[in-house]
Image (cartoon, rainbow, N blue to C red):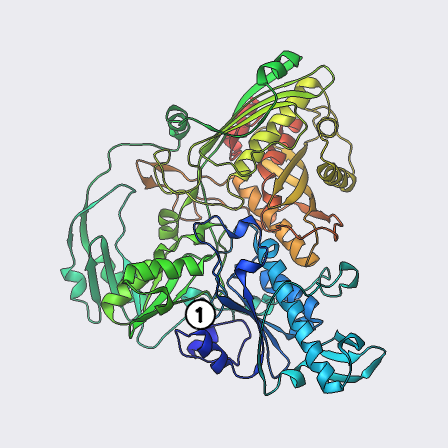
Amino acid sequence: MKEESFLALDFHDLEVSFPVTRRDFLRFAGGGIFVFVSFGELPFGQGQRGVGQELPADFNAFLRIGADGRVACFTGKIEMGQGIVTSLAQMLAEELALPLDSVDMVMGDTDLCPWDMGTFGSMSTRFFGPPLRQAAAEARAVLIELAAAALARAPQELVAAAGAVHVAGAPEERVTYAALAAGQRIARRVDGRVPLAAPSSFTVIGAPALRADAAAKVTGQALYAADIRLPGMLYARLLRPPAHGAELEAVDTAAAKAISGVTVVEEGELVAALAPDPETAERALERIVARWSTPAPGLTDATIFAHLAENAPPGEVADEAGDLAAGAALAALTVERRYENAYVAHAALEPHAALARVEDGAVTIWASTQAPFRLRAEAAEVLGLAEERVRVVAPFVGGGFGGKTHNSQAIEAVRLARVAGRPVQVAWTREEEFFLDTFRPAALVDIRAGVTAEGRISFWDYSVLGAGERGSRQFYAIPHHRTLIRGEGWRGASRLHPFATGAWRAPANNTNTFGRESHIDELAAAARIDPLEFRRRNLEDARMRRVLDAAATAFGAPFAPAPSGRGFGIACGIDAGTYVTLMAAVDVERETGEVRVRRVVCAQDMGLVINPAGARMQVEGCITMGLGYALSEEVRFASGRILDRNFDTYRLPRISEVPALETVLIEAGDQPPQGGGEPAIVGMGAVIANAVFDATGARLLRLPMTPERVRAAMT
């Protein structure tokens, strides 16, 4: 298999040597129309800055119209199952008046694609989409200019459609994009002045489209980092500590070195067995004898919440208005609660993997990563190279959820390849994945709030510890409120957490929405108002009210003051610019405490929906994944040892447990597109907790709501 086949998705005609300069790129790519963009001159939104790096001022190619009429779209974003391989292609095809199947996506290649901060935060469509559309609109204008010369017509007489430019009213008088691009090398720079297509004219955007990667994935043709093979490559198995905090005191590698074909690398804390096949590497690793220091007795999953509370740093106010004391004086009733969530693993289907080749003063890395350009910088620093000498290629990524923003497996491969002088692949086992990956942090939410005799929230005193700010700001109409953020949240290990924590799908928002929406239901129950009416009474945000009402219409069943015995729940949230309401119906087995979710309705306002089919898939994926953190997923640990190292004890939702799902996408085509990969998951903990309360009268204050905890809450 040729190495170039790993570079892109269906982009066959670009074969180059790397690293490349921009001049090399144009030379090797041959004829065609190239559209470049100067990032600094286009509006990208705040999400593209804020990671310590400004967008570059150099020109980056967004697209190329080839001599065969096909269009290559270059993006630093990666495809990890979220479907942007299709939706970004739709945005490009719409502006270019091109059939969708004429677009080839080139994704996550640092030598070919424009710089990108990484694929996370549901920002691909929101922040990469607008400049991509602008570049495509510029290309359309270039094509019309060329066609005007070819057809001896004025540009205003011409129309672009279906991969060609024709005279308005005379479609037979036409010239194809392929004919216009053939034999030419035309480079244009986006200036942002060409108007975009109007929503009323859309034919590709907003039309349901099948996933462009579906066939490759269901037939097993899709390549992931662990699937890539190079001549002479070695497989690595690395020595790992038995617990977080353990230190290597002594190591004996003689028995491993005695195995034919095995190379043992000892470089500081990095000890690895390399072999031509993974089985031999594993056998060699088993023969390495290591002595580790034993970490002192420390935290466990049973003591972590007391530790968080005892070590809470001072808070920072994220949002406030009015006066809490004045609001408390207006309250006819007050409710105070603490809500908790456990550590949760990313548990992506694909464990971290990478293949690195170091030769001739340059390195190429194929990695399962959400952040290729960040990895390029990290590898360059480790090797002492300029970033231009490092190339990162991201094949398909089998799920990330924030966990693959960390690239330690790729750095391990780079270090080993440098020592071995041959390509080295590092593919974590499932046990390594559970030990080495970051976790969603355990967290506490403390809320004290009051309601007037008229059923309006008069004050809201909110504090979140250990999770972070996202999703914590108040959107209900509360005159007196304060939101306090305590601790570093998910941004890496801190003194609050015994091991590394990290972003986990909609980081912090799952925690904050669980606390907020559970407490909203607590207030409604205390006031003897049904949870739907209570929310309506305390919402002035027209957009959220519209989403809430759309969900209620689809749900179809009336709500009553909880607990009603029917098992209905509601949760609202905002994430990545998208407004979402979930409604659920559950059954609870009182003898066992088992919760069975029967139905979930999700209404979502995500602005302009690029691919309705893809958006529904994302919603359904969020709901299914959300069942896990709500009901069963929890990382157990003791003194640095991770006790759940595989799916035999770490329980994910089963297919048989997925409820009936219904998605309502609000028509909002006049609004910019917003994030779709995370919003629907943020309310899953709260909507199920609220439904359990409605069914049983038992309030679950800790996630996950295991049968044991549900049964205990009912006694």
Secondary structure beneath disc 1?
loop
Above or below 241: residue 1: below
Indicate the position of residue 159 as horizontal and vertical percent values: 77, 75
Indicate the position of residue 683 as horizontal and vertical percent values: 61, 38
Name the quadrant of the C terminus: top right
Q: Seen from this angle, which residue lies furthest right?
A: 169
Indicate the position of residue 674 as horizontal and vertical percent values: 64, 50
Name the quadrant of the N terminus: bottom left
381 left or right, relative to 714: left
Task: Residue type at mark 1: give it.
Answer: Asp
Looking at the image, which is closer to me, 30 or 153? 153
Determine the residue positioned at 37% across, 68% down.
Answer: 388
Looking at the image, which is closer to me, 596 or 49? 49
Determine the residue positioned at 70% across, 67% down.
Answer: 94
Mark 1 crowdedness (10 Å alpha carbons): few <14, some 14-19, many ≥20: many
Asked if residue 92 shows in the view, the reply is yes
604 left or right, relative to 232: right
Looking at the image, which is closer to me, 460 or 246? 460
325 left or right, relative to 348: right
179 left or right, relative to 127: right
Asked if residue 697 shows in the view, the reply is no
Looking at the image, which is closer to me, 514 or 658? 514
**Which residue is under mark 1?**
111
Indicate the position of residue 618 as horizontal and vertical percent values: 62, 52
Q: Quadrant of residue 89?
A: bottom right
